[in-house]
Image (cartoon, rainbow, N blue to C red):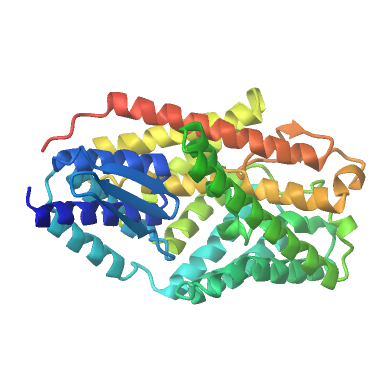
């Protein structure tokens, strides 16, 4: 291999790793992929090191090391699907480094499937669907939809403004809390405002980072896992501060932020909410063509399994089983259906719904304000994931809710690992 060819291989590996990180792949998956690609191009001697925001390739033969940062703009799901296809070809050595670099550049520049206004509408649909999963009142669903429109607009407007983007979570949490708490005080106590506030913030809650960080720690990637977990915890605390500040300005005492659950919609509306959430996520994050029906199917399956297992056994176990089954089905769709989208793209919306980031936000907000010990005489019901019916486990304090959320993160991680191993064992061999 000439010096020029060696440099092209290194650059392709760097750019591919960068694209996978921007797509949301965990560090261990990126490391495994890049190692396979290096071997496919006859460069098994390359030493690879991946962090959540950077990739390094050390070439001992040339005596040089090259580093590339992940970048600030995350890729959409339709772009992530194309990155997956490039990675698949690269694993088999079926694409030249130069062609691979051109493909990755084209993916970065590709226009989204849906215009910005459709994406904003998708955020609102996802928020309303999420509120339906919580079975809040009809007023609460309407307020969640309006909050989703606002949060979606903020995300779209700051997409290409990395200097302003960090201000979106606290500002969005403040405005949503101020508006929803203030409006709820004019309606009645049947609105369950705290969970309504959490619904439009779903796109900003780092539940995926919490679970991926735990997954990376379990895989031995200490630096990556720790950094993700710390960043996710800080993000939740920032959102909590915004909620408390908004409640104060709405003249609602932070010590009265109860999560009223005495009057909820019927249980069957939660399945409708899961389907609406799936459609909203597909629009907001530009699911690739043909993937929406599979996403709706996987979300309904995961939600049904979680509810059944929570009812019969345990909610923590339910989160892990739902994650394992849905990821396994996503792998089957990827490998057995000719036009099946990548499992990663199919499972991501399910992943966002399963991870307990929202429940953790609610629990922390109530724990900080002290409502866990003084909220109501009725026992607060909660489960350990976003898709909970809030009927599976009774806990005596909101600190317990946070602990249960942490337990479900571990359960989801274990379920994903089991599904990944099972998928590798049964999937058909790839033909060149």
- Give the farthest residue toward the front: 63
327 or 361, which lies in front?
361
User: Residue 430's quadrant in the figure?
Assistant: top left
- Give the farthest residue toward the left: 2
Residue located 63% across and 30% down the image: 316
Can residue 246 be seen?
A: yes
Residue located 85% across and 67% down the image: 185
355 or 258, which lies in front?
355
Q: Is residue 224 above or below residue 236?
A: above
219 or 2, which lies in front?
2
The reply, left or right, for residue 395 in relation to residue 65 is right
Q: Is residue 189 above or below residue 405?
A: below
Image spot of residue 251 (x, y percent) = 88, 70
Can residue 338 be seen?
A: no
The quarter of the picture where the C terminus appears is top left
178 or 4, which lies in front?
4
Residue located 13% across and 59% down the image: 98
Image spot of residue 160 (x, y percent) = 44, 74
The reply, left or right, for residue 337 in relation to residue 182 is left
Image spot of residue 406 (x, y percent) = 65, 37
User: Residue 186's quadrant in the figure?
Assistant: bottom right
Q: How many marks?
A: 0
Q: Is residue 8 above or below residue 343?
A: below
Q: Is residue 221 above or below residue 145?
A: above
The reply, left or right, for residue 371 in relation to residue 325 is right
């Amino acid at each position: 291999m000439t010096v020029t060819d060696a440099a092209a291989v290194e650059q392709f590996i760097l750019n591919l790793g960068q694209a996978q990180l921007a797509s949301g792949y965990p560090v261990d998956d990126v490391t495994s992929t890049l190692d396979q690609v290096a071997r496919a191009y006859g460069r098994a001697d390359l030493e690879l090191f991946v962090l959540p925001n950077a990739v390094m390739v050390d070439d001992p033969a040339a005596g040089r090391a090259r580093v590339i940062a992940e970048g600030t703009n995350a890729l959409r799901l339709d772009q992530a699907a194309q990155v997956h296809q490039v990675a698949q070809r690269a694993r088999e050595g079926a694409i030249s480094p130069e062609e691979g670099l051109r493909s990755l550049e084209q993916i970065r520049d590709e226009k989204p499937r849906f215009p910005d206004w459709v994406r904003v509408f998708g955020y609102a649909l996802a928020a309303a669907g999420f509120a339906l999963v919580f079975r809040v009142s009809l007023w609460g669903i309407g307020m969640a939809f309006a909050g989703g429109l606002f949060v979606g607009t903020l995300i779209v407007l700051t997409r290409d403004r990395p200097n302003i983007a960090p201000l979106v979570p606290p500002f969005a949490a403040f405005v949503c809390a101020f508006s929803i708490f203030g409006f709820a005080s004019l309606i009645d106590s049947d609105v369950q405002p705290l969970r309504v506030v959490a619904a439009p913030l779903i796109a900003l809650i780092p539940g995926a980072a919490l679970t991926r960080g735990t997954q990376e720690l379990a895989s031995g990637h200490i630096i990556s896992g720790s950094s993700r977990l710390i960043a996710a915890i800080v993000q939740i605390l920032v959102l909590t501060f915004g909620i408390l500040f908004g409640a104060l300005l709405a003249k609602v005492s932070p010590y009265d932020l109860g999560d009223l659950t005495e009057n909820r919609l019927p249980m069957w509306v939660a399945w409708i909410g899961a389907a609406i959430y799936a459609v909203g996520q597909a629009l907001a994050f530009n699911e690739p063509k043909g993937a929406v029906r599979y996403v709706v199917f996987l979300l309904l399956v995961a939600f049904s399994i979680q509810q059944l297992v929570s009812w019969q056994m345990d909610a923590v176990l339910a989160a892990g089983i739902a994650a394992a089954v849905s990821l396994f089905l996503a792998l089957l769709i990827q490998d057995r259906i000719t036009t099946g989208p990548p499992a990663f793209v199919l499972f991501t919306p399910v992943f966002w719904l399963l991870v307990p980031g929202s429940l953790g936000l609610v629990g922390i907000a109530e724990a900080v304000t002290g409502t866990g010990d003084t909220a109501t005489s009725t026992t607060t019901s909660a489960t350990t994931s976003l898709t909970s019916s809030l009927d599976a486990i009774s806990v005596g304090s909101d600190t317990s809710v946070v602990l249960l959320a942490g337990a479900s993160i571990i359960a989801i991680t274990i379920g994903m690992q089991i599904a990944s191993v099972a998928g590798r064992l049964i999937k058909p061999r790839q033909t060149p």
